[in-house]
Image (tube, grey):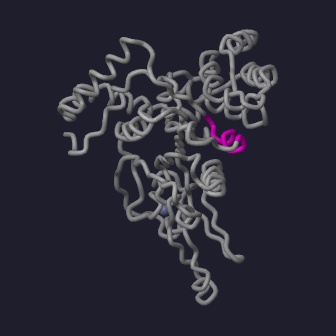
């Protein structure tokens, strides 16, 4: 049964393979650090995000918890869940929480009632968007137009999985483990390079140039507009299979192994290609492990590293002024191939 506001089915998105893979990998493993999608309007960015959330199987959450804590993972519980150990459980789907460009820092992190804390000695916290975002997808359209400081706060929370609010010696923290998806149209201004580097993955989406694929996109769009439900039903089985594959990958991710040769290859890639900072190495390994889990492999292979390099490296390449980060995937392939034992 489809609801009235049927979203465009994820599996009916033609092309944009890098964007789809980057989103899937972040949903499996939010610790990758999010994805920034750059591209003109009309390149299915927000459609892809919304429709991906639709296909994920329902998951368990603590009844009445303001942060949708996971009942099966007490180590990430909020203070309230820890205090009333053994609460009820309900099920819901992962949601897409939108962060408006106009959002202030208070609206994002929430507010602590300092007066109440000083007078009564207890903390009263009004949750913000980062509370809603826990275990969900946080989608920031036009992230390049957001206040730099708010972007910083978002990226901190995304990296830690925790929102820590500190005001006048009083602090409050709650789990905020979300998949950060930013999108932007580069024609409307850029994001500072320091901020771009903090997104785990970056993909550039472009209009499709393949004639057959373009025609397919239009055909699907028209079919969808004529009758969204009928159209969505055609992709239901495929969507369900993909959703199950993603949730299986989540469960096996912790058991995926990597060899010493894999770490050597990662270091080799970063040094030889001249990527900036140390975030590149760790993101490459995490992304490769997650890709292995998605592909049903127990250990990282060259293919996983190749996918990881494509998504995690280009935006970290040293660049000259007025030049985009460029990366030759043939160089990447050659470097990876040089390491035995992968
Ligand atoms: Zn909780």
Quadrant where the N terminus is found in the figure: top left
In the image, is residue 168 part of the stretch drawn in magenta?
A: no
The part of the image, by quadrant, that contains residue 87 is bottom left
Residue 237's spot in the image, x, y percent? 28, 26
Horizontal side of residue 218 vs 152, given as left or right: left
The foreground one among 342 and 145 is: 145
* Residue in the image at 64% along x and 63% along y: 164
Question: Total label count?
Answer: 0
Residue 177's spot in the image, x, y percent? 55, 51
The part of the image, by quadrant, that contains residue 31 is top right
Residue 157's spot in the image, x, y percent? 62, 54
The residues colored magenta run 193-201
* Residue in the image at 63% along x and 50% along y: 155
Please, is residue 72 above or below residue 212 in the view? below
Horizontal side of residue 193 vs 147, given as left or right: right
Residue farthest to the bottom?
A: 119
Quadrant where the C terminus is found in the figure: top right
Residue 160's spot in the image, x, y percent? 65, 51
The part of the image, by quadrant, that contains residue 105 is bottom right
* Residue in the image at 42% along x and 59% along y: 62
The foreground one among 139 and 164 is: 139
Please, is residue 192 above or below residue 173 in the view? above
The foreground one among 199 and 57 is: 199
- How would you classify the magenta stretch by its main secondary structure? helix
Horizontal side of residue 217 vs 132, given as left or right: left
Please, is residue 22 above or below residue 211 in the view? below
* Residue in the image at 60% along x and 85% along y: 115
Horizontal side of residue 201 vs 44, given as left or right: right
């Amino acid at each position: 049964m489809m609801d009235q506001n049927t979203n465009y089915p994820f599996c009916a998105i033609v092309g944009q393979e890098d964007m789809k893979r980057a989103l899937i990998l972040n949903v499996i493993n939010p610790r990758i650090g999010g994805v920034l999608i750059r591209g003109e309007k009309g390149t299915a960015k927000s459609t892809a995000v919304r429709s991906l959330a639709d296909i994920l199987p329902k998951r368990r959450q603590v009844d009445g918890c303001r942060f949708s804590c996971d009942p099966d993972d007490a180590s990430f519980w909020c203070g309230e869940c820890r205090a009333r150990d053994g609460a009820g459980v309900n099920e819901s789907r992962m949601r897409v929480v939108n962060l408006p460009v106009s959002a202030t820092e208070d609206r994002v992190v929430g507010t602590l009632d300092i007066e109440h804390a000083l007078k009564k000695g207890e903390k009263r916290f009004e949750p913000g968007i980062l509370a809603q975002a826990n275990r969900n997808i946080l989608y920031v359209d036009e992230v390049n137009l957001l206040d730099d400081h708010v972007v910083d706060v978002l990226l901190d929370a995304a990296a830690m999985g925790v929102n820590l609010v500190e005001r006048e010696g009083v602090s409050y923290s709650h789990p905020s483990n979300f998949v950060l998806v930013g999108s932007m149209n580069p024609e409307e201004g850029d994001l500072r390079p320091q901020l771009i580097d903090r997104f785990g993955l970056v993909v550039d989406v472009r209009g499709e140039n393949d004639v057959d694929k373009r025609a397919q996109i239009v055909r699907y769009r028209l079919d969808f507009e004529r009758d969204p439900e009928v159209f969505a039903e055609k992709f239901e089985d495929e969507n369900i299979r993909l959703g199950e594959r993603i949730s299986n990958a989540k469960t096996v991710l912790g058991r995926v192994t990597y060899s010493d040769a894999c770490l050597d290859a990662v270091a080799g890639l970063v040094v030889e290609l001249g990527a900036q900072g140390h975030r590149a190495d760790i993101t490459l390994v995490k992304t490769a492990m997650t890709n292995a889990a998605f592909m049903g492999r127990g250990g990282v292979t060259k293919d996983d590293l190749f996918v990881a390099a494509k998504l995690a490296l280009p935006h970290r390449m040293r660049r000259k002024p007025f030049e985009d980060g460029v990366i030759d995937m043939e160089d990447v392939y050659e470097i990876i191939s040089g390491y035995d034992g992968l």
